[in-house]
């Protein structure tokens, strides 16, 4: 003989099902927001001649680094895909940038300095990201293998 469920048991089952649905939805949203960015991966530079430019490196996993060969790392932080080739970059120090990617490179919008710079992709490196010899500390995710 089957036992009937009481109202409190139905409530517990409904709350449990709701919790599971909410958990699944949150995991899906988290994965969308923190999805890798393989199409952005690579090294970009404002002026690669003589090593005088500013470099912008994306690892394809949601990290970026902006540096020069004379000053070292200027910014290191995360990159969030807004869709349609638009990105928000946030440095560890809290500085924010906007970026727009086209087929030739990335436009970087720096609101703090009221500046827009174009960073052509260094095609000779393909999708690899390169960090040339710079002064100071490297970000952990860019540290050359030992």
Image: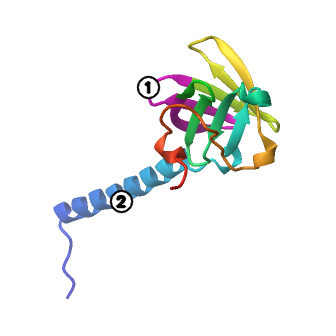
The answer to which of 144 and 81 lies nearer the viewer is: 144
Q: Is residue 17 above or below residue 101?
A: below
Name the residue at 72% across, 21% down: 117
Decide: few, some or many residues near mark 1? Use Cα within 10 Å; few <14, some 14-19, many ≥20.
few
**Numbered badge on residue 20:** 2
Give the main secondary structure, helix, strand or loop, of the magenta stretch.
Answer: strand
On the rendered structure, is 8 left or right of 145? left
- Helix, strand or loop at label 2? It is helix
Pick out the residue farthest to the top: 114
**Numbered badge on residue 93:** 1
Indicate the quadrant where residue 27 lies: bottom left
Name the residue at 80% across, 44% down: 123
Task: Give the residues drawn in magenta, as a range.
Answer: 75-96
Asked if labels 1 and 2 touch by Cβ distance under 8 angstroms, the answer is: no
Indicate the quadrant where residue 58 lies: top right
Q: Residue 76 placed where, x, y %? A: 52, 33
Q: Earlier in the sequence, mark 2 or mark 1?
A: 2
Decide: few, some or many residues near mark 2? Use Cα within 10 Å; few <14, some 14-19, many ≥20.
few
Q: Is residue 146 above or below residue 135?
A: below
Q: Residue 9 placed where, x, y %? A: 19, 65
Q: Residue 81 placed where, x, y %? A: 61, 39
Whether residue 84 is visible, yes or no, is no
- Helix, strand or loop at label 1? It is loop
On the rendered structure, is 50 left or right of 31? right
**Numbered badge on residue 138:** none
Whether residue 99 is visible, yes or no, is yes
């Amino acid at each position: 003989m089957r036992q009937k469920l009481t109202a409190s048991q139905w409530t517990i089952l409904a709350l449990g099902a709701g919790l599971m649905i909410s958990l699944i939805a949150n995991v899906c949203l988290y994965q969308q927001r923190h999805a890798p960015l393989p199409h952005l991966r690579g090294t970009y530079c404002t002026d690669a001649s003589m090593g005088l430019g500013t470099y912008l490196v994306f690892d394809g996993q949601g990290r970026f680094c902006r540096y020069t060969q004379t000053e070292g790392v200027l910014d290191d932080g995360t990159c969030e895909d807004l869709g349609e080739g638009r990105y928000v970059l946030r440095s560890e120090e809290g500085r924010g940038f906007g970026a727009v990617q086209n087929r030739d490179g990335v436009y970087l919008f720096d609101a703090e300095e009221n500046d827009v710079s174009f960073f052509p992709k260094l095609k000779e490196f393909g999708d690899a990201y390169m960090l040339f010899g710079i002064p100071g500390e490297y970000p952990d995710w860019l540290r050359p293998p030992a």
